[in-house]
Amino acid sequence: MNSQLPNYTLLDADRTKEMLKLFKGVRAGWVQVGEKKWFFPYTYTKEVEAFYNFKPRPSDTWIISYPRSGTTVMQELIWLLSNNLDFETVRKTKLTERFPFLERSLVNNPEVIEEFVTMDEGNVEKREVCETLTRPAYEVLEGLSTPRFIQSHFPLSLRPSILDSGCKIIYIARNPKDVVVSWYKMNKFTVTHGYIGDFSTFWNLFKNDLTIWSPYCEHVKEAWARRNHPNFLFIFYEELSVDLLSVCKKVANFLGKNYSENQLTELLNHLSIEKFRKNPMVNLNDLYECGIFSSRQFFIGKGKTGHWKEFFSADMEKEADEWIEQNLKDTDLVFPTTIMKGNCY
């Protein structure tokens, strides 16, 4: 391996054997990357050089987050604010085309996708959709003209030169108790993960840094430490639930854009949870069409924070609070705990 690339080790054999019983969609196990042991599917080993060498451009706008932290609504918000509120384009062009996910090939294993296609052999349309999902996004992005919009779940330490590139980066974070509930649901509904265990077991994996893109707290702390960089904007998911208009204004200012109150009202209407959940351009319907998602309905959540209370027992809640306190003892980062049932995602 190139000495400049992140080092990785295979997850130990006993742990892998046990986890493969829980994740029925995984074929080849997992690796742990770097000193912080970032957790990825084994397919990472085949693409690590391409990911590491992918070059940001000064004109790029990136959104970085841990999964299930409010990424999708922020992508739509960022793209519209950056493109003069071009609602005509967003209504006919998928978000995945406007704002590609850098690591999509990492989780859409070509061998597994081929299994889905073979199950429905002869369905040309399905094959075309599935093959699109397995084409590495870094190849697609290299061919795009500027400005580019890029989504990534990689932590900042695996993109060491990104802040020096001059690009704009928006990071969104969320209370980990809500994150793990949403991530649990996605792992169950995503056939390429195929998680069949219960929530308690998934929580134990999450807090022990054994779910993809973990460790969670390290992911957020790296971003929090760079929050004052002029090209970096840190936002909490919970801010969306409290005051989405203020978030829109904050992001617009960061991007150097200015809009009237009437224009922002139109934006808020477009982003309302009722419309967002029904919007086929943001719901990753192509993953359902390929067979990766087992349902069309779960990807955009129900529009509330504090949903973790429906999943955590009293003992689990105590354990989670202690885990959070322990992980944040070396930082002034505090996760919001606001529970809202309004216009959030």
Image (cartoon, helix red, strand yellow):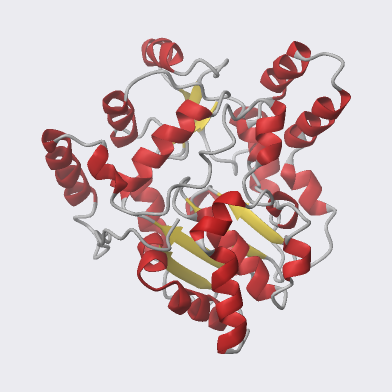
Q: Is residue 130 above or below residue 273?
A: above
Can you give x and y, in whole percent of width and height, for residue 169 in the image?
56, 66
Residue at image position (57%, 58%) is 275
Q: Nearer the viewer, residue 135 or 129?
A: 129
Q: Is residue 140 left or right of residue 322?
A: right
Q: Is residue 59 left or right of residue 143?
A: left
How many labels sit on residues? 0
Q: Is residue 116 above or below residue 296?
A: above
The C terminus sits in image quarter: bottom left
Residue 39 appears in view: no
Q: Is residue 148 left or right of residue 276?
A: right
Can you give x and y, in whole percent of width and height, for residue 68 in the image?
46, 46
Residue at image position (63%, 84%) is 257
Residue at image position (73%, 57%) is 98
Can you give x and y, in whole percent of width and height, for residue 200 in the image?
26, 27
The N terminus sits in image quarter: top right
Q: Is residue 50 above or below residue 144?
A: above
Q: Write down the quadrant of residue 17 in the picture.
A: top left
Residue 28 appears in view: yes
Can you give x and y, in whole percent of width and height, for residue 161 in the image?
59, 60
Residue at image position (19%, 55%) is 329
Q: Nearer the viewer, residue 183 or 165?
A: 183
